[in-house]
Image (tube, helix red, strand yellow):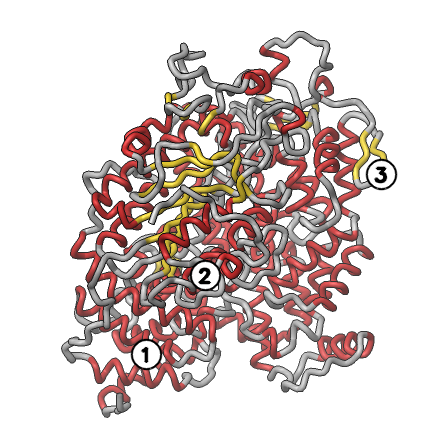
Amino acid sequence: MTVRTPATSRRAFLKGGAVLGAMLGGGVVPGFIRRALAAIEDDMGDTLGRSPDGVPAGARRKVLAFLFLRGALDGLEAVAPYGESRLAELRPDLALPAPGGERKSDTGPGALLDLGASGFGLHPSLEPLLPLWREGTLAVVHAVGLSDATRSHFDAQDFLELGTPGLKSTRDGWMARAAAQAAGGRSRLDAIAVAPRVPRSFRGDPSALAFSSVDQLRIRPVAGMPGGPRGRALARQTFQALYENAADPLVAASAKEAFAAADFLEHKLAELGHGGGEAGYPDSPVGKSLRLLAALIRSDVGLRIAFAEVGGWDTHAQQQGTLSRHLADLGKALAAFRADLGNSIEEVTLVAATEFGRTVRQNGSAGTDHGHGSVAFVVGGRVAGGKVHGRWPGLDDDQLFEGRDLAVTTDLRSVLAAAAAVQLGATDVSRLFPGYTGIVLPGLVGV
Amino acid sequence: MRPAIVTATCLAVACAHGARNDVTPPLLEREQNEHLLSRATFGARPQDRERLARIGVAAFLDEQLHPERIEDGALEAQLAKFPVLERSTADLAQDMADERGMRRDLVTQLAQAKVMRAVASERQLQEVMADFWFNHFNVFAGKMNEAALLPAYEREIRERALGRFGDLLAATAHSPAMLIYLDNWRSSAPLPPRARATAARRKRGLNENYARELLELHTLGVDGGYTQADVIEVARCFTGWTVAEEKTDPRFVFRPGMHDPGVKRVLGQEIAAGGQGDGEAVLDLLAHHPSTARFVSRKLVKKFVSDDAPEALVQRAAETFLRTDGDIRSVLRTLFESPEFWSRRALRAKVRSPLELVAGSVRALGARVDDPAALARAVARMGEPLFAAQAPTGYPDDAAAWLSAGALLARIDFAVALSRGQVEGVAVDLDPVAARAVALSLGSPEAQRR
């Protein structure tokens, strides 16, 4: 674009320049702002025909989604091994009655739900997931976790996201490496985190996007611009030009993806009106996140690998009530997600996992402290559902990890690798999880 | 001209630690002033620049390091709009017990007051540090009646923000806000195994939550040299540190009946002070531990200098920490008088947090804030809802954390909204051309950093 400075705008600029001057401490108005101001003057009144080069609509893409349950979910409550007599013994206040059993109190959750899987029952608050279990779109992996023994949330979360337990210096996240391996190469908007911040899982992928709502992507028209979508597009273009030449690599990289996405998504998702209204999403953070995720999948924006997260699992005290509430929320959100996707569920695999589990023994406050093994949920059309995967380690003293926690018999990386292989064609496990020499969990996700 | 005291200190330090092989030209005076204001305040107002230029860096720092000497009456008058700040913890807790929806009201008021202070307090460095320490000792307003405890908790932190680290640590350890947030108030010695398995017995036992985060996040750092056994021993030391009348008049109390009287070993050291003294001894041990000095110093260097904390400066700050019994003011002086702080590498090295961006933009315009509600909402929209960080880590402090696509566009949108006078409660009235200039400036790539 040629930069003109018509007389009118030059005159007008002096006023703006005075304000700026005061702000910048009497310094000169930087050239980039001057040029951008001039460009606005030029563009004003231009019709905006510039259509963003969207992702070509084509065959349905397979999508891998990871839902991070931050805070250490108590897998022994979510999917309870009621067949273990030790459970009721070590958790006198927490263990729920076996399926069909009488509820323990009027206020607490009722009995476990029958999964038809010997010895395991589903937490009653996860009832919305039963239809998924029965239709075979939900699988459980039990005694799953990291190979590292840390009980620090923050180390464990990093280890999981980097995909290298015990190693914090890894430069990129496992989802960034998965995206890089995606069959058919990269395309715009293929890696999205429905989150306020880019998660470590995507670290190292400059094109991974993070936003928590579509509303967050709107820039309103700058003063003097027309209102509505046209003004917003004009504002976007103005700032896009400003950021294109940013010397700051981090800011420039984020901006490049942000503007491209904003343009495209505003149109795409406006058509959809977000959708999912009838699916029954809870009005909660995870409900909103999964709703947006489903909209992104259904509108086929190009998504291949997605991240979402939900916290609140760190139940150190009086955990029964808190956990029931959070599980109910999660169950409703996942069930709505599945309903919302309709037939698209065939192309989706979502893995919901946590950084570690919680002590087998309840603590002094009817809660549980940081433990080791936990549970993961896998939702999708190609999932071998209705089944508890993994090898059960048992809860006897000599079977517990460090004498207190559920042991890990399935490395979480074997679950993620199985999903990444089928959904993305990311079959190079040593590249996906450097240093990992274990298996890719067989029979979990079908081709 | 370069402020004499700073130059002298820089030279002394540079000599003492070997001249750095830094060929980049030193900062110009104007850059120095901008740099200092960008770190010691939430952003420069036009009058701050004038004042700093007039009194110089040394006097400015002296002033800001002694907030008690700074008159802040105008802010106090504005804070009168937030009654929660004045009311007692007991009153607020009672309200929360009686009335649904009180939590939201409490947190909203607190968030608005925090934004107001960031924008309008003359004690800027104290506010920057109060924000830093609150985040360091983070608690979450969504737990139980935590919201009622926050005004007192925040006040205790603010009062000690430039004092001794040990005092700050002790204040948080004794606060009902921390005791409830990290569950220590429920932690007790288990009854001996022979006792009957009654419901009462089950309510007894350790809760490791506070002990672990005390070591990992408040003091030593995750690599600070403790084990799972230390976590359990520390938890034993703090048994009996609990909260009395948690629903109606929450306050710290030590209950000997909950305390584990046995001998403990923490970090190889025997703790046998007995009773409440066990916990106090642990706090004392941790507050003076070299790992704590390094962990806290590194976090401060990251906050004030750059995400990529220069190791030599961390080391010197940690030495100051240990030498001065954890005097935060002295550690800050070490930072502000270091060549690393005044190096070109540190200039604009930090990405502004949402609170810094919002407060800084308003300050840059010198705009009057009548009602900070919309500003607090903007901070939340950019990804930093105040008092709502659920995990004990608080919010991150590195550049990448705040520059997601959504957050960046929300930041730009805020600049446009502010320029157009569309942020409710903030008096901005610019003609369209000036508004455009302001939007582009506050929404520019350069404005994302400080």
Which residue is more in the foreground, A258 or B373?
A258
Of marks 3 and 2, the one in the foreground = 2
Q: Is residue B104 left or right of residue B136?
A: left
- Residue drawn at (62%, 55%) of the image: A167
**Residue name at image x 36 percent, y 63 percent:** A183
* Secondary element type, mark 1: helix
x then y, percent, for residue B164: 73, 50
Left or right: residue B155 versus residue B339 is: left
**Which residue is identified by label 1?**
A241
Amino acid found under the numbered disc labelled 3: Gln
- Letter of the chain that mark 1 sits on in the rendering: A
B399 lies above or below A319: below
Residue designated by label 3: B269
**Residue A106 picture quarter:** top left
Q: Where's residue A65, x and y in %?
A: 37, 50
Estimate how packed mark 2 is, as few (under 14), some (14 to 19) or many (20 or more) residues with alpha carbons within 10 Å.
many
Circle nearer the N terminus (1, 2): 2
Asked if the residues shown at circle 3 and circle 2 are in contact, with their CB atoms under 8 angstroms apart, the answer is no
Q: Quadrant of the N terminus of chain A?
A: bottom left
Of residue B361 and residue B180, the one placed in the foreground of this image is: B180
Q: Is residue B197 above or below residue A308?
A: above
Q: Are marks 1 and 3 on the same chain?
A: no
Q: Read off the residue under disc 2.
A: A176
| Quarter occupied by residue A340 | top left
**Residue type (three-letter) at the residue carrying disc 1:** Ala
Residue density around tag 3, few if under 14, some if 14–19, many if 20 or more, within 10 Å = few
